[in-house]
């Protein structure tokens, strides 16, 4: 169903853009036949991507996937720019003398936004630093450094090569605790992935991960390869479970709430994971930033999530926020701090507007008098 929505959306956007662009000075020298012929080529490239996505076609498959998904991203940005002009001119009823030129300007703006987004999407994630006072944290754990990475979406060897730079960054930051927040592997068989690099990251309190919606969407069979790589590299899976990583510090992780809702699965991950846990400070890993209020009521001090990508392409974050009110950054939910990562990678188009991806570096602080 999601693929159908993408295909219909791209088809409508492309038809709309070609219809409005045909009357602009930018394309004045081209016949309508050549313009619609170009449209047929662009549509064919996108459909080829939809049919061949994630098939083992080597470099050709990567190129098809890259072109098709970035055509979708470009279409979104061009449509936004064009629609702004439509609103200003009331779809051509006002400023008629200037409307064609304004639509031509929208094409130029769309092209500039596309280039900027492509550049931003290829840049390495930045390190976002936070200090969080964690209720119940013993004094001897004050200053504990936690690193969190989400949504790398490693879908090809090229993604893995880029992620290797992120691994180097993680190693250089020397965390006490390293967590992956889901959607790390996306249709990629990591047989050639740099397992030794992941294995060499040292974290005295352990390395842990939870599953995201992409890893869990087809059950155990698809996330197994990526999960096995993480396990071989010293990571442990938290799936509606918790662990005492140090006296007075509990790390809990739940299955992805998006997939739990879509599949109408039984059970209550929050209650199952948090009820009856030992005393101490609690950090909750949840790929999807939902049910933060319930986590706070259950006594969680810090909740870490990803999934939203901050909308990835402005201005679509405004729409994403309607479904995920905790979109990106730091929030205070009752006595709990919630931090939502923008993700270390991209999904679909390798584009970002405006902020780059991020790695979360969180220094845990004990309240005064604790311990």
Image: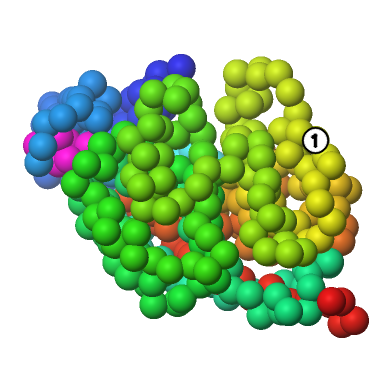
Q: Give percent across and percent down for residue 213.
A: 51, 34
Q: Nearer the viewer, residue 246 or 24?
A: 246
* Residue 51 shown left or right of residue 241 in the figure: left
Nearest the camera: 290 or 321?
A: 290
Q: Position of residue 61 (x, y in %)?
A: 15, 35
The answer, for residue 321, to whether it is visible in the render is no
Helix, strand or loop for the magenta stretch, by majority: helix
Dividing the picture into quadrants, the one containing residue 114 is: bottom left
Where is residue 41 shown, x and y percent of the image? Answer: 15, 29
Q: Residue at x 46, y 76 (%)?
A: 174
Disc 1 crowd, CA 10 A, few/some/many (<14, 14-19, 20+): some
Camera-side residue of 154 and 110 = 154
Q: Residue at x 25, y 29 (%)?
A: 53
The x and y percentages for residue 119 are: 29, 63
* Residue 64 among magenta residues: yes
Q: Secondary structure at mark 1?
A: helix
From the image, tell me which residue sits under label 1. 271
Q: Nearer the viewer, residue 309 or 164?
A: 164
Identify the magenta region. 60-68
Q: Residue at x 23, y 21 (%)?
A: 51
């Amino acid at each position: 169903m999601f693929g159908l929505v993408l295909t219909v959306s791209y088809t409508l956007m492309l038809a709309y853009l070609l219809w409005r662009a045909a009357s602009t000075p930018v394309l004045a020298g081209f016949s309508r036949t050549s313009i619609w012929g170009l449209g047929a080529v662009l549509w064919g490239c996108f459909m080829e991507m939809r049919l061949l996505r994630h098939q083992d076609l080597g470099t050709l498959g990567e190129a098809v996937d890259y072109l098709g998904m970035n055509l979708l991203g470009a279409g979104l940005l061009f449509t936004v720019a064009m629609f702004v002009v439509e609103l200003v001119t009331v779809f051509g009823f006002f400023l008629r003398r200037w409307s064609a030129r304004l639509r031509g300007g929208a094409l130029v703006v769309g092209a500039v936004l596309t280039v900027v987004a492509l550049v931003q999407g290829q840049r390495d994630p930045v390190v976002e630093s936070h200090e969080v006072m964690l209720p119940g944290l013993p004094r001897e754990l004050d200053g504990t450094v936690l690193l969190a990475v989400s949504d790398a979406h490693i879908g090809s060897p090229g993604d893995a090569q880029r992620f290797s730079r992120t691994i180097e960054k993680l190693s250089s930051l020397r965390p006490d605790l390293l967590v992956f927040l889901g959607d790390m592997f996306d249709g990629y068989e990591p047989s050639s992935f740099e397992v030794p690099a992941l294995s060499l990251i040292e974290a005295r309190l352990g390395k842990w991960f939870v599953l995201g919606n992409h890893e869990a969407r087809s059950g155990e069979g698809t996330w197994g390869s990526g999960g096995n790589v993480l396990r071989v590299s010293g990571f442990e899976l938290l799936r509606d479970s918790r662990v005492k990583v140090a006296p007075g510090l509990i790390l809990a992780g739940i299955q992805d709430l998006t997939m739990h809702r879509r599949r109408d699965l039984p059970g209550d991950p929050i209650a199952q994971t948090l009820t009856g846990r030992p005393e101490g400070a609690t950090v909750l890993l949840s790929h999807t930033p939902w049910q933060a209020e319930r986590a706070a009521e259950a006594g969680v001090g810090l909740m870490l999530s990803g999934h939203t990508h901050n909308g990835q392409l402005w201005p679509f974050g405004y729409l994403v926020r309607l479904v995920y009110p905790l979109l990106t950054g730091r929030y205070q939910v009752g006595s709990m701090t919630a931090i939502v990562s923008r993700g270390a990678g991209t999904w679909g188009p390798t584009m970002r507007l405006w902020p780059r991806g991020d790695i979360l570096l969180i220094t845990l602080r004990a309240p005064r008098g604790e311990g």
